[in-house]
Amino acid sequence: MRRIGLGLILAAVAAMANGSGALAAPKWAIVVHGGAGVIERRDLTPAQEAAYRAAMTKAAEAGVQVLQKGGSALDAVEATIRLLEDDPLFNAGRGAVFTAAGRNELDAAIMDGRTLAAGAVAGVTRTRHPISLARAVMERSSHVMLQGEGADAYSLEQGLEQVDPAWFFTERRWRSLEKALGSQRLPIPDPPKGAEDRPDPAEGLAHDEGKHGTVGAVALDVRGNVAAATSTGGTTAKRWGRVGDSPIIGAGTYASNASCAVSGTGTGEYFIRLTVARDICALVEMKGMSLQAAADQVVQTELTRLGGDGGVIAVAPDGQIAWSYNTSGMYRAAAAEGRPLTVGIYKDEP
Ligand code: ASP
């Protein structure tokens, strides 16, 4: 649990760097998550831990590069998520979890805090980068959310990179599926065609058989605009076209320059009912709460009270950044103007 206002600390660090006594807010900032869940030190070998930290660092650095050059928060979050979607360590794009039918059905959303424009896709199966498809929906269609076959068709029509569904396959996630289906006494489907011939890039690296590993990013750019993005394979052995919170604007993803940008991770059924991302921003906007206090209120109090598990990352136009989670760990990274990039996994890390 984080109770300290990280935004204030960041402002103080920036002030020290300026050599001034006054608190100066960072002009740009980015926070990234790679999923929350049961992540204990004993679960990770040093090599596995190093691999996660390296992946989080690389993804955050991609966003930092955009922001440092004066690029937009939207470009920063998209660049960050695209890297994580290609990384088999995470439950997004390649490395996504499987449905009970043995498919990867991917969800993603992106939102622009400057205009409240938003784009989301659910259940897509052939787009290498679902986050870029969500952005195409936002910028090139008159809709906010597309799902299933229609979303796949739109992706093709828009010229986004298409891949064989076996591209997303990893042995590790297949084993999780087998375990989940076994415990529910459901039949185990055949793996996607072509999957057998693929070497598993995650083999020997990943520790958990759990459902987490969704990725998200929030950013503030030098023009004072915030943006949020989230991408996921959802939950292992999901059925009946289940859609989680990640692509639902206001639940797993939200951004408004009037308050903040939030990306969540956790059991989506709880995040949807609490409209977690929008609620955090509403507390900031309407109650004048600090970003950290608002995130803690929704995650530590409301989500926990409802029995939900997970966490959020957030950034505000004034440079505050925050995260809050009620699980034992959350893969996360943060960087801001005047402050070095930091990566954390466990609760006892800053
Ligand atoms: N929130 C995602 C979902 O419910 C899963 C996760 O973040 O672990 O689809």
Image (spheres, rainbow, N blue to C red):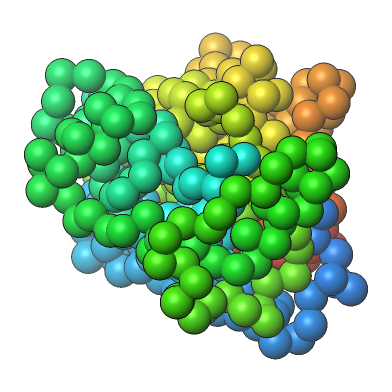
Q: Could you tell me if residue 241 is visible in this image?
A: yes
Task: Write the residue at 30% across / 25% down.
Answer: 146
Q: Report the residue at 68% width, 72% height from top.
A: 206
Pick the residue in front: 292 or 205: 205
The residue lying toward the viewer, choosing from 87 and 277, is 87
Quadrant of the snapshot with the C terminus: bottom right
Residue, far bottom: 47
Residue under the image location 75 percent in, 59 percent down: 209
Q: Please provide percent x and percent y for residue 51.
A: 61, 80
User: x and y percent of residue 116 in the render?
Assistant: 30, 23
Q: Position of residue 11 (x, y in %)?
A: 54, 53
Q: Quadrant of residue 291?
A: top right
Can you name the residue that lies furthest to the right here? 42
Q: Is residue 32 left or right of residue 182?
A: left
Judging depth in this view, the residue of 344 and 271 nearest the camera is 271
Against 120, is 224 above or below? Answer: below
Q: Quadrant of residue 242?
A: top right
| Residue 288 in view, yes or no | no
Residue at point 78% right, 53% down?
A: 179
How many marks do you count on the picture? 0
Q: In the picture provided, is 265 more to the left or to the right than 37?
A: left
- Residue 194 at x, y percent in the picture: 40, 67
Task: Specify whether 71 is left or right of 257.
Answer: left
Location of residue 324 with respect to 144 vertically, above or below? below
